[in-house]
Amino acid sequence: MRLSIAALLTASLVASPAMAQKADFEFAPETVEKSGPASKTMQKALKLYENKDYYSASIELHKVIEGETGDSDANKQRAGFFMGKTLYHLRFYSASLSYFDRVVQKGDSHRYYNATLKWLASLSRQLPESVGILKKIGKYQRAQLDQPELEKVRHELYYLLGRYHYTAGNFKDAISLFSAVPQASPFFARAKFMEGITHVRQYKAKPAAGAFKVLLRTAEESPKTNEIHRFRELAILSLARVFYSTGQYDLSIKYYDKIPQKSYNWLPSLFEAAWGHFQRKNFSKALGNVHTLNAPYFENYFFPESLILKAVVYWKHCQWQKSQEAINEFKAKYPALQKQLDSIVNQYKDPSEFYEYAIKIQKKTAGLGASVGRLARTALGDRTLDKTFKYVEELDRELKQVQGADPAWKATAIAGVVLQDLSLQKSLAQREAGDLAQRRLRRLSKEIKALRKQSIKVEYEIINGQKNELEATVKGELETNTRVRAKDITPDDEHDFWPFNGEYWRDELGYYRYKIASRCSR
């Protein structure tokens, strides 16, 4: 079983809230030393901003930035900062980030460098990480987050700067920042979860489990919000994986069993728990979980490795025919699907073109066969990819906003700047989304290819087992009675035993057990 660190980060586990939220993020006025007399244009721009006439304000601010008004460099910096805020309020988030990025690039030499932090926090709620917001926040020192003006967003910034240090591999700094987010903060759950994940990245199981358990205890004591519920479940899943990695299979299974059937994570938890049962030699339950995973209810989900596990269980019981049948089931389905995946990916060299095709795959208009279409949509259902696709949609929305704006504003220089920025960002975002989609399909193809190699190894062991059994029979060394009676399955007080008759029932899913007998010689 390959429980990689990436598996712990499915997700979107630490995703920002949905894009294109209402732009109602307000702060106290920024404290910056005076920049000297401002031109009438600058004064007019600030007045328009105060009156929330943001379209008109953007026109005047652009004149100041471009040096048309004779303003000092200090006032130009002020105009650039206010332009970022103005475009944010207009919900031109990509263009807003471009202006704030100019501030960040100048560092401490820019008068509004510290004041920009809170707007970066705000933009992180609207834009995906792929646009580089974390890297911009990463230019700041922790001490700069303790400014009084940042009180409302300080805990969010602790979390975001912690995320930056996590991605940069600065784990000590990341943990320090995550642990600084107090329990009362709305960002506590995600910060504590990331604290646990950071320990996992360092292969430190004990502090990782400690962080996840703190999150679970907090969830029990806190109001049941969507935020706390989501991270509670991710903490449970992560604890199960941590205990599996340390060989504590009973504890691992205990936590896997806490994932409810209605959860998005239920099927992956069943599959991973099957390996835990296998390690505990509870082969009956391991096969039962595999049986559930391959139920017709879940035809849109794929667990090819479950068939390899099934084959290995039967191989360990010297049931060569059933082991081979499981391998045959895998071979009848997945090698052909792998070739089709490769064909899908390779027909487009340009990632931007593949983006358009990926949209068709998601909408079921790509003309693919039923099975490969479902498999491709599974790979493209990745939450990180979903956020990247949604960013393209957000840029589309902003472009339409430009096109639908007042004709007088559309004819201005700032409108041209915004339009150019959005067009460029959309082109880059489409390319990135297409590239990421191709990589997701290639990764899936690579995983199937690796499983094909495993299936060949299992077949080789099946042949060896049959050969050894035949040789022992010829030599008269094999006991006449090599059949061992299958161990009876005894239900507890909360369950009844009911033989499977070929028909799946939803209330039985997850509760199947297999009676399996060993045919190995004693």
Image: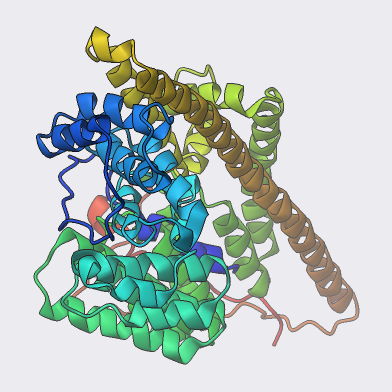
The residue sitting at 64% across, 34% down in the picture is 341
The residue sitting at 66% across, 52% down in the picture is 447
Q: Left or right: where does residue 226 sit relative to residue 445?
A: left
In this rendered view, identify the residue nearer to me: 350 or 348: 350
Position above or below: 262 against 47: below
Q: Quick one: quadrant of the C terminus?
A: bottom right
**Residue 469 falls in which quadrant of the image?**
bottom right
In this rendered view, identify the residue nearer to me: 123 or 115: 115
Residue 97 visible: yes
The residue sitting at 26% across, 35% down in the picture is 42
In the image, farthest residue toward the bottom: 206
Q: Left or right: where does residue 109 sit relative to residue 212?
A: right
Residue 126 at x, y percent in the picture = 31, 44
In this rendered view, identify the residue nearer to me: 252 or 397: 397
Residue 388 at x, y percent in the picture = 45, 40
**Residue 398 falls in which quadrant of the image?**
top left
Position above or below: 210 against 421: below
Residue 410 at x, y percent in the picture = 31, 13
**Residue 441 falls in which quadrant of the image?**
top right
